[in-house]
Image (cartoon, rainbow, N blue to C red):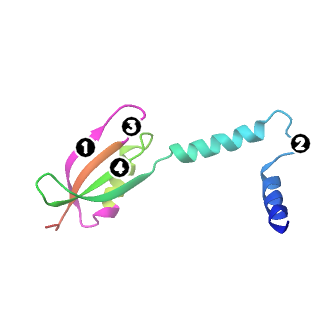
Amino acid sequence: MQEYIQWKAAADKFSDKNDKDGAAVCRRLMMVCALLLGGCAMTTPISYTDGKPAQFVECSASASWSVCFAEANSACPKGYSILQQREQTLWANKALTIRCQGAL
């Protein structure tokens, strides 16, 4: 019962009892969508076609290239060379394949 009371208290924080038209729910949904569509990027170590180590940097479609390059800079603080750069349709991601300076 205690868990239900805690869950109910948490749920009540997200409900707006004075909101008759659902505007608060819409605002919260828009904030979640903005966070999900915001610039996010991730780096994965890979073996490139020549067999040498490289990094695959993938960014969300809504992110600017500066987000991708910032992620590449984080992955390779001493610099990098771009092996491949691609951008597809609206819903596809942007991607960089890079090789860090000083990598074997």
Give the mark nearest the N terminus, 4 or 1.
Answer: 4
Helix, strand or loop for disc 3: loop
Label 2 near label 1: C-beta < 8 Å? no
Give the mark nearest the N terminus, 3 or 1.
Answer: 1
Report the amino acid beneath label 2.
Asn
31 falls in the magenta region: no
Give the mark nearest the N terminus, 3 or 4.
Answer: 4
Q: CA distance from mark 3 to mark 2?
A: 40 Å
Viewer-proximal residue among 43 and 64: 43
**Disc marking residue 92:** 3
**Disc marking residue 40:** none
Write down the quadrant of residue 28 in the picture: top right
Q: Is residue 6 above or below residue 48?
A: below
Report the amino acid beneath label 4.
Glu
Helix, strand or loop for disc 2: loop
> What residue sits right under mark 1 in the picture?
85
Q: CA distance from mark 4 to mark 1?
A: 10 Å
Going 23% across and 62% down the picture, which residue do you hit?
Answer: 79
> What residue sits right under mark 4 in the picture?
58
Going 40% across and 52% down the picture, which residue do you hit?
Answer: 41
Give the mark nearest the N terminus, 4 or 2.
Answer: 2
Circle 3 residues within 10 Å: few <14, some 14–19, many ≥20: few
Q: Is residue 35 left or right of residue 39?
A: right
Report the amino acid beneath label 3.
Ala
Q: Is residue 21 left or right of residue 100?
A: right
